[in-house]
Amino acid sequence: MSENEAQNEDKNTEPSSSNDFETGSITVKKNGHFIHCLTIIGQIEGHYILPSQNKTTKYEHVIPQLVAIEESREIEGLLIILNTVGGDVEAGLAIAELLSTMKTPTASLVLGGGHSIGVPLAVSCRRSFIVPSATMTVHPVRLNGLVLGVPQTLSYFEKMQDRIVNFVENNSNITAEAFRSLMMKTGELIMDVGTVLDGDGAVQCGLIDELGGLSNALDYLNSVIEEGNDKCSGQ
């Protein structure tokens, strides 16, 4: 094999330089491990297309990427960076459920904000981090537009809210009762009920695992990857 052919083969087998800025993702190599970084920013777009001036994360872009990452033999870890105001509840929960069931080591990092449906997304990874200056808004489920004032509508709201509460309880260190009390707190949000948590408050209540930044999240992923490799080599 010639030198040029060998170089071309190396390029085809190493994804360290691949990136996709359109979907806000990039794969980097650190300490010999390939870690994929995926950003969830702005408003999470679901079944309805949002106005073009809105910064959005489209779930039809994120879901195929997660499947590809899980099936990839090269990518050993996934970092989710969150700065979102929330958005479509079902789309957000769909992404969160996928993240929580991945075998690939995952970590989330909340920067700026992880509001509304961004909360389940933040806790869906194996380890969650938040910077001190970030905030997270916990509030009840809300719907925009025309809502029928009938018992069935209230039942639908309650069931959707239960889905969120149960997911958060199962994927973090906060109890369902404590999370509901944050959702229904009055006197903190103008014209609404709920709670705004800063980085330290999110950790203290058990919603987020620890305070930390980018280096902490990457160090965690590398340690988990190396631990898994050590177990495989030991077998």
Image (cartoon, rainbow, N blue to C red):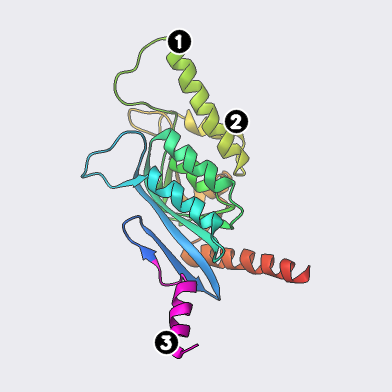
| Mark-to-mark CA distance, 3 and 1 | 70 Å
Q: Which mark is residue 4?
A: 3
Few, some or many C-alpha atoms within 10 Å of disc 2 (few <14, some 14-19, many ≥20)?
few
**Sequence-first disc among 3 and 2:** 3
- Main SS of the magenta part reads helix
In depth, the one of 74 and 217 nearer the eye is 74
* Residue 221 x/y as whole percent: 57, 63
Q: Residue at x 72, y 67 (%)?
A: 232
| For marks 1 and 2 on the same chain, the one whose residue lies earlier in the sequence | 1
Residue 233 pos. (x, y %): 73, 71
Residue 15 shows in the view: yes
* Neighbourhood count class around disc 1 (C-alpha, 10 Å): few under 14, some 14–19, many 20 upward: few
Q: Residues within 10 Å of mark 3 (few under 14, many from 20)?
A: few
Whether residue 11 appears in magenta in the rendering, the answer is yes
**Which of the numbered marks, if any, corresponds to residue 151?**
1
Give me the C-alpha separation between circle 3 and circle 2.
62 Å
Residue at the spot x=42%, y=87% of the render? 4
Q: Nearer the viewer, residue 76 or 186?
A: 76
Foreground label between 3 and 2: 3
Indicate the quadrant containing the C terminus: top left, top right, bottom left or bottom right. bottom right
Between the residue at mark 1 and the residue at mark 2, the CA separation in whole angstroms equals 24 Å
Residue range in magenta is: 1-18
